[in-house]
Image (cartoon, rainbow, N blue to C red):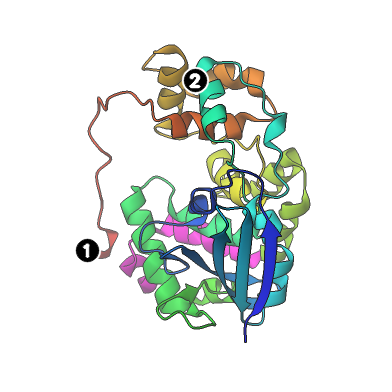
Amino acid sequence: MPATRTWTAPPSYDLRSNLRVLRRGPYDPCYRVEGGAVWRATRTPDGPATLRITAEAAGATVRAEAWGAGAEWALERLPAMLGADDDPSAFIAHHPLTREAHRRHPGLRLPRTGLVMEALIPSVLEQKVTTHEAYRAWRLLVRRHGERAPGPQDGMFVMPDHRGWCRIPSWEWHRAGVDNKRSATVIRAAQRAPRLEEAASMELAAAMARLQLIPGIGPWTAAETLQRSNGDPDALTVGDLHLPSIVGYSLTGARDVDDAGMLELLAPYEGQRHRAARLILIAGRAPARRQPRFPIGDIARL
């Protein structure tokens, strides 16, 4: 029998939208949506766990079932993962667009998994490649080198532990389309996993600094990680190909805003810059594409 827990959600809570940021592509072997349930396979400090999460009574009550050695750990931290530690009332809108997006999405919460490596490794795989390539690499590596998720859901997998990532041979990285730079970064991070996991309980500046001690991890990767592991509302992604232009166009109509311009525009939101960016993206006002898509490479063919 699975272990269970319920959580009373705030008004207008949207389970699927809030947890979607934890999914790495439509075929993520660690994440599945089936009917009204979100299934999530994870590796906790106590071992693998699978969660089945459903929202009842128009989202007011969330119920979770858990299987595996890490079930109790996962259920203990269920509210944080669902966004219970997040405080959207701290957000003050400084633009009509963010004000309207905040009004339209009162149930938005930033999840906090407390699991750094789980968020870090796929973020490393997403460096300098298309999302299609990164999602494929994550899917292949987890399916081949992870383990089947506990519980009744077939076809779900838990990612390897830190030793497992270090044992993946070079040709398997190559087969998954991961270049030497990214695979070396993952291995360096896995070798220091206990120290990196400590970042889950750090303030943003210290956590960013801790992650960036690993060669190959810069501000972009660190922010993408801490948005998920720490649920930090100020962990703004810097160095992204598209985000500055989307923020600039959404707030001012300008099309060629860079990181410096984005930081200037979001300066009034200090402490809440990641939430502001999320709301801007949700609003869906993006400039028309004026450059070719990033080409899809095929490292496995080289």
Figure disc tally: 2
Secondary structure, mark 2, is: helix
Q: Which amino acid does label 2 sit on?
A: Leu
Name above or below for residue 89 compared with residue 162.
Answer: above
Residue 80 lies in what quarter of the image? Answer: bottom right
Q: Position of residue 232 (x, y in %)?
A: 67, 42
Q: Residue 246 falls in which quadrant of the image?
A: top left
Examine the structure image and report whether residue 277 is included in the region drawn in magenta: no
Mark 1 secondary-structure assignment:
helix
Q: Looking at numbered disc 1 in the image, what kind of residue is underneath it?
A: Arg
- Percent x, y of residue 25: 39, 56
* Residue plotted at (47% across, 68% down): 30
Label ID, residue 301: 1
Residue 191 magenta-highlighted: yes
Q: Position of residue 263 (x, y in %)?
A: 57, 22
- Label 2 and label 1: CA atoms lie apart by 45 Å
Q: Nearer the viewer, residue 29 or 294?
A: 29
Q: Magenta stretch?
A: 169-192
Which of the two labelled residues, at mark 2 and mark 1, occupies the earlier sequence position? Answer: 2
Q: Residue 97 carries which label?
A: 2
Q: Of discs 2 and 1, which sits in the foreground?
A: 2
Task: Work out whether residue 33 can be spotted.
Answer: yes
Q: Closer to the camera, 157 or 66?
A: 66
Residue at the front extreme, as displayed: 57
